[in-house]
Amino acid sequence: MGRQLKFHIFRYNPEDTNSVPRTDDFYLEETESMTLFIALTRIREEQDPSLQFDFCCRAGICGSCAMVINGRPGLACKTLTRDLPAEITLMPLPVFKLIGDLSVDTGTWFRSMNEKVGSWIHNDEAFDPDAQEERMDNALAEEIYELERCVECGCCVAACGTANMREDFVGAVALNRIARFMLDPRDRRGEKEYFEVIGTDEGVFGCMGLLACEDVCPKELPLQDQLGILRRKMGWSALKRLFRVK
Amino acid sequence: MDTELADLLCIGAGLAGERVAIEAASCGFKAICLSIVPPRRSHSSAAQGGMQASLGNCAMGAGDNQDIHFQDTVKGSDWGCDQEVARLFVETAPRAVREMAFWGIPWNRVVPGKSAFFKGGKEYEKVEPKENKGLITARDFGGTAKWRTCYTSDGTGHTLLYTMDNKVVELGVAVHDRMEAISLIHDGETCTGVVARCLKTGRLKAYLARATLIATGGYGKIYKESTNAVINDGGGAIIALDTGVVPFGNPEAIQFHPTGIVPTNILVTEGCRGDGGTLLDVNEKRFMPDYEPEKAELASRDVVSRWMIHHIREGCGVKSPYGDHLWLDIRHLGERHIKTKLREVEEICNNFLGIDPVTQLIPVRPAQHYSMGGVKTNKDGAAYGLKGLFSAGEASCWDMHGFNRLGGNSLAETVVAGKIVGEKIAEFLKGYDVQFKTASVKDVADRVQERLERRISGKDGGESAFEVRNAMQDELMERVSIFRNGKDLEKAVENLQGIYERSKRVGLRSNGIGASPELALALKIQGMLRLAICVAYAALKRTESRGCHAREDYEARNDRDWLNRTLATWKEGEDLPTLNYEPASGVLEIPPGDRGYGVSKIITRDGETTGA
């Protein structure tokens, strides 16, 4: 016999005029290797088919299923129930617009973030289909990949004090993205252009230094380091501007 | 009803859909992508291993070229592929890889000097050439003569998808996420868009487009045990089949991947075996060399999967509460290798199994993995049967994979086909005009609305959509799996027809207001069953064994009678699909022969039996 698990789950369907925000309780018997993906799927299929939540790859790769699990943002698919107490409270991520129950609109938020930071290689040259690829040191490729591993799940944003108070704060995810492009020689943006994107209170100077972002990142990205590096770089850039150093 | 207009409508915003949209947008056309999830969540992201292209930069890839890639692909397909398409693919792949590098992929690069590698659990040494330092490198994958699979650590699909979507953002291509296409708008001759349902609000919306592309990925979720994401339920295939005029190519060509973990079926990459991982049985004995002395664990996926099931049937599986399985052993690759080159694998083992692959064995067994079949198109990506309809990627049957896809050829296909089909659609759009008829839009919208209301009201009955889906998944898993035979397939078709009848009586348990996941399934379940019946029925009729399609009662590959492709259409009101056939390939650059691995009993085109 597995443990009897009790789930408190936030419920609200904004499309339904009769729906009111509340918490519903569900019970399940725990099984071997049970993840929140398995548990929530069973609750929907066996107890309440209206329950909304998001899973896609269910393998920790796609970032769909972030939610607040006993007070902490995390990916539900890679959360084993055996690592949780028998009472489990699930809430949708804050900051993002609620779609219903545990489902939030991360798509709109991240598209806008990607537009804001110019999340692409800025390069005016045209691709030459007949040319050999530009060479790159493997160590650099791996360094870029390290930061590219972000899955845009939204945990760092949901856990961020600033993002919860200020809608215009770009969040650790955006700063990490900029750090990724600054490493990449194929991106021809200079310090000045990066400064324009993140050298502001909406960017790197808005961070209060609480650093929950790194604590909750399911990919264990070095968000704190990136923040420090960017702050130093942008700080220098600001000073240079102040004193007009060329 | 809210209506939107575009030159090109891409249904699906994974790698193939977005690559096509980028090409059209680059030519100045207005492209809109619909996606049931935010685009970066698409299943393309889950492909860990890599993308094949014959760059030949690394030591073990030296001397590689398009001809060798072509041979591997044709052999891999068991001569079921369209060789003209395969040729086009291998020619374009190197350029596509470099283009992705130009757009920002951090491909792993050649590091000159000596390094160790494992093959079949033994350690070997290779020396990477100094002159190739910093060029794109490659790793070994099953069924290939050279190391050809370009990769970024074990997140190749992820980096490709992010880079592709970056390009989409750069070009300002609109992606309407959480928008599900429910029905194509067509008049039997021309396709002019879709009626879609918003998965945020539940509202319907019409999209009118001069060209419509289906790029919705595979349909693995009609099976119970599948490595596919939960979204891979064949949505695109279903709306194409619903037209009654667009044929579905080779529905029976379903690939099983040798290494899904037990019990969750999450895939661990072929890179494990490529890098030297081995398969062990209950006695922790390595068994693949006994069946495949030459290729061992690196024979093609269909062959490895079959031997695994065979070995389990011989009583050599490991017993578990979730059924018998085998072991994947990567311990000898060492901590450093596992923690860098196979990091996602390590994470999967830690997070979903609670085991450490550096010191422990990984429980694996074959699970449904890839759909070679799909919306049948010509080599330009234009669907048969409807003008203005196109398809690319796993959703399509273009058809470069025939009856078995090689690892690393699917990521490559999404990007390569996306590029080629994108160019062809741009050409098509330049000289094409079409009339949008408001009456036919209204007609489709009314029909969708009626279906929706019937499901919500429970007017047709109270069958649970989930239970009907489970019954279908179990049936396919039980009788239309890795080994097939006439008796079981006949039973499967009969049972699936019964389940199909039940699917017509599905009624909601919830109120269906808003996004309603239950309604989303209820609207799709009948189509999923038609798809499932196509798979089972086409498998029943194909009385030979080819690639992944292994008939116990017809063990030979039969080139005399079956060197062809199944084309399934579903006429309205019928309870079985109509099957037609076309030659597998117009051009036979490489005539059918022995693959060099797997069972090689062949009935030749002259009717001779060889390799018996």
Image (cartoon, coloured by chain):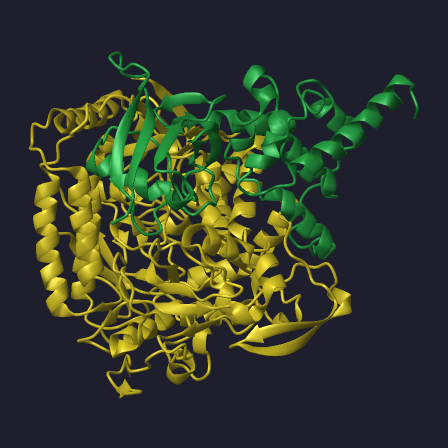
Chain colours: A green, B yellow
Q: Can you give x and y, in whole percent of width and height, for residue B198 in the image? A: 33, 26
Q: Furthest-top residue in view?
A: A17
The residue that appears at 24% across and 12% down in the rendered structure is A18
Q: Can the viewer see residue B569?
A: no
Q: Is residue A71 above or below residue B360?
A: above
Q: In this view, does B418 lie above or below B465?
A: below
The C terminus of chain B lies in quadrant: bottom left
Quadrant of the image occupied by residue A191: top right
Horizontal side of residue A177 vs A216, given as left or right: right
Q: Is residue B70 above or below residue A15?
A: below
Q: Can the viewer see residue B414?
A: yes
The residue that appears at 24% across and 21% down in the rendered structure is B513
Horizontal side of residue A52 vs B69, given as left or right: left
B598 vs A30, nearest the viewer: A30
The N terminus of chain B lies in quadrant: top left
B288 vs B283, nearest the viewer: B283
Q: Report the label total.
A: 0
B610 vs B151, nearest the viewer: B151
Quadrant of the image occupied by residue B343: bottom right
Horizontal side of residue B109 vs B341, given as left or right: right
